[in-house]
Amino acid sequence: ACFIGHELINRSIYTNLAKKLEKNVDSLIKQGIIYFGCGAFEGFDQLAGMTVLNARKSNPGIRLIIVLPCKQQDFLFSGANTRTYKDLIANADKVVYVTEKFSKNCVDKRNQHLINNSSICVTYMKHIQSNIGQTVRLAQESGLTVINLA
């Protein structure tokens, strides 16, 4: 399964979204999903990655794979988001860099990699007319089951 979602999450729904995500990850584990791909961007990606790491405590067989568009992506983050990003990288079972250097389409390549290596896409998509919406449409066209937690 892969995770794709908005970087900005309204504080008023964060706790509820975290609970939904936890239930969803638990359900996927019960269905036999053991590999979880995540981009580690701010917002939904980081929440999803941390949820998988928490679930791994009681399900040691599951794996978190961080898929990054390029090396040194952390220049995009600040403060607590940088710490969470580094925690995810340090605790992931595998880190994949889709390209060496940042370019205008490296994030699209990262999203394509997540889709190509998944059968389920868990998303937090509130706006269909967004980069997330475009990626979710690509996931649907590729035959993935899409679960929108928005």
Image (cartoon, helix red, strand yellow):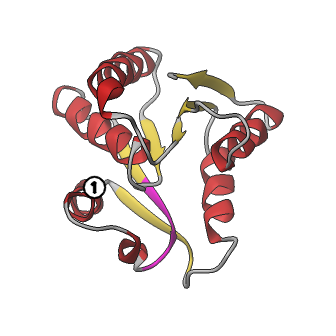
- Residue at 66% in and 45% down: 115
Nearer to the camera, 128 or 113:
128
Residue 78 position (above or below residue 22): below
Query: Viewed as shown, does residue 34 lie left or right of 136?
Result: left
- x then y, percent, for residue 52: 31, 36
- x then y, percent, for residue 126: 58, 30
Query: Viewed as shown, does residue 23 lie left or right of 109?
Result: left
Residue 83 position (above or below residue 23): below
Q: Does the magenta stretch include residue 70?
A: yes
Q: Tag 1: Cα neighbours inside 10 Å, few (<14), some, or many (≥20)?
A: many
Residue 42 position (above or below residue 83): above
> Hey, which residue is sitting farthest right in the picture?
141
Which SS class for mark 1? helix
Regarding residue 61, the answer to whether it shows in the image is no
Nearer to the camera, 95 or 51:
51
Amino acid type at mark 1: Leu
- x then y, percent, for residue 25: 38, 24
- Residue at 60% in and 49% down: 114
Residue 102 position (above or below residue 85): below
Give the total number of marks visible in the rendering.
Answer: 1
Residue denoted by label 1: 88
Regarding residue 92, the answer to whether it shows in the image is yes
The magenta stretch is 66-71
- Residue at 55% in and 83% down: 100
* Overall secondary structure of the magenta section: strand
Q: Does the magenta stretch include residue 6?
A: no
